[in-house]
Amino acid sequence: MKTFNIPDFYRSRIITPIKEFRRQKDKLKRDFTPTVLDFGPVRFLIARHFGFCYGVENAIDIAYKAIAENEGKRIYLLSEMIHNPDVNRDLQDRGVQFIMDTKGNQLIPWSELTPDDIVIVPAFGTTIEIQNKLSELGINAYQYDTTCPFVEKVWKRAAQIGEKQYTVVVHGKPTHEETRATFSHSKEGAPTVVVKDMAQAHRLATYITGESSPEQFYEEFKGQYSEGFDPAEDLRRIGVVNQTTMLAADTQGIADYLKQVMIHHFHLVPDQVDEHFANTRDTLCYATNDNQDATYALLTHPADLVIVAGGYNSSNTSHLVELCEEKLPTYFIASADKLLDRHLIRHYNLTNKEEVVTENYLPDQQPVTVMLTCGASCPDAVVEGILLRFLSFYEGTRPVEEVMEIFR
Ligand code: SF4
């Protein structure tokens, strides 16, 4: 497997060796049981898979190379390179400027850029329109292109579906950078519409059956369909792709539902289904699948609480939080300093989209069992910081070196 040059400060003397130890013992990734770290008064159950994925390591490698190779030049990122505040802050501290925010709002006008500038394309990829804009400005968008190959794979899948005259339905968050990029690439080859969840899939079904009018479609799916989209014609043959970081079960549910809608509406017998519905598998990446499967396995064990670490705008991390919230008290935190003390935690509420403070998040009895996991863009160093912060709340914990002995 390709290895990347990642700055040491993103690694951890605890988490990184554990991952390597587990990887060596289970190269085929068949064992999803969590790693247990027993410090006495506090125990940690650490998910089998979490943290930096191929695409994130690739992006970090390229971005730091761009900085090293272009001293004295102005270096820009189209927007956050990945959804992690530590990584983005470090790049900004090294002089990298963001041209847009994560929603696509312009922070630096295009007119300020010159052909001498370096522009890094983030791991989510970018739109055809922005690629063209950079070409017009004389900037090579491919010199430091960190687009994840697994995102490009979705674009290819959309193109294949389009070549067979299906309309592409993208299951994704409409304003997320990756979905905007996928939408842009997909619409080059096929009518394309984005659905964000099952509720929108239900609404889309009413346009497939003709129950709702095209006028309603244009209002309801505003900003989510390609130019010239005709719901009466373009929803007769569809195929589903998805943002690489959605919940596997959600995409499966949406694809199964839309397939059933097609079968009923067009009165299809089994060997006619392909005429109206492209039977494709989801386009989740390996990291999303591994992290979600490892989270399901983690949650089969008893524990007092779960800590999920990551950027609050990280799609894959928020889905791990949703899975954990179904089973246990779950706290979504960006860094160790959100553990204010033994009694107070500042954490992100996914529903209200704001940080809140919760009291008495740790039980009084000992030992306390804490589950730990994080998203694909969260450095091991952040997870280590959280673990050490918990240890600082307890007297008489076993030394880290002693607990780590079994991983040497
Ligand atoms: S989460 Fe998946 S698609 Fe996103 S950067 Fe990582 S490997 Fe690529």
Image (cartoon, helix red, strand yellow):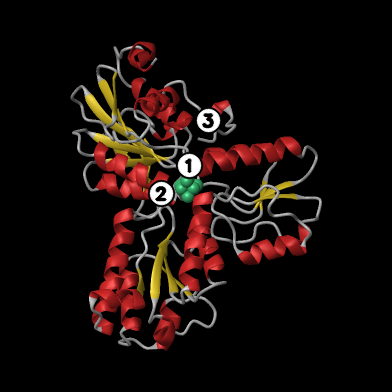
Relative placement, left or right, of 275 versus 311 is left
Where residue 310 appears, as percent x and y from the top left, is: 43, 41
Instruction: Report helix, strand or loop for mark 3.
Output: helix
Q: Report which residue position mark 1 lands on.
A: 377
* Crowding at mark 3 (Cα within 10 Å: few <14, some 14-19, many 20+): some
Gap in Å between the C-alphas at discs 2 and 3?
19 Å
In the rendered image, which quarter is residue 327 located in? top left
Instruction: Report helix, strand or loop for mark 2.
Output: helix
In the image, is the residue at mark 3 within 8 Å of ligand 1 by its beta carbon? Answer: no
Amino acid type of the residue tagged 2 in the rendering: Asn
**Which image quadrant: the C terminus?**
top left
Amino acid type of the residue tagged 3 in the rendering: Tyr
Disc with the residue nearer the chain's start (2 vs 1): 2
Q: Report which residue position mark 3 lands on.
A: 10
In the image, is the residue at mark 1 within 8 Å of ligand 1 by its beta carbon? Answer: yes
Disc with the residue nearer the chain's start (2 vs 3): 3
Where residue 332 appears, as percent x and y from the top left, is: 36, 42
Q: Are marks 2 and 1 in contact (CB under 8 Å)?
A: yes
Disc with the residue nearer the chain's start (1 vs 3): 3
Q: How many marks?
A: 3
In the image, is the residue at mark 2 within 8 Å of ligand 1 by its beta carbon? Answer: yes
Tell me, yes or no, if residue 276 can be seen here.
no
In the rendered image, which quarter is residue 353 located in? bottom left
Pick the residue in front: 267 or 131.
Answer: 267
Where residue 295 appears, as percent x and y from the top left, is: 30, 41
Q: Residue at x 29, y 12 (%)?
A: 396
Amino acid type of the residue tagged 1 in the rendering: Ser
Q: Are marks 2 and 3 in contact (CB under 8 Å)?
A: no
Relative placement, left or right, of 128 versus 346 is right
Pick the residue in front: 369 or 153.
Answer: 153
Q: Which mark is residue 316?
A: 2
Instruction: Report helix, strand or loop for mark 1.
Output: loop
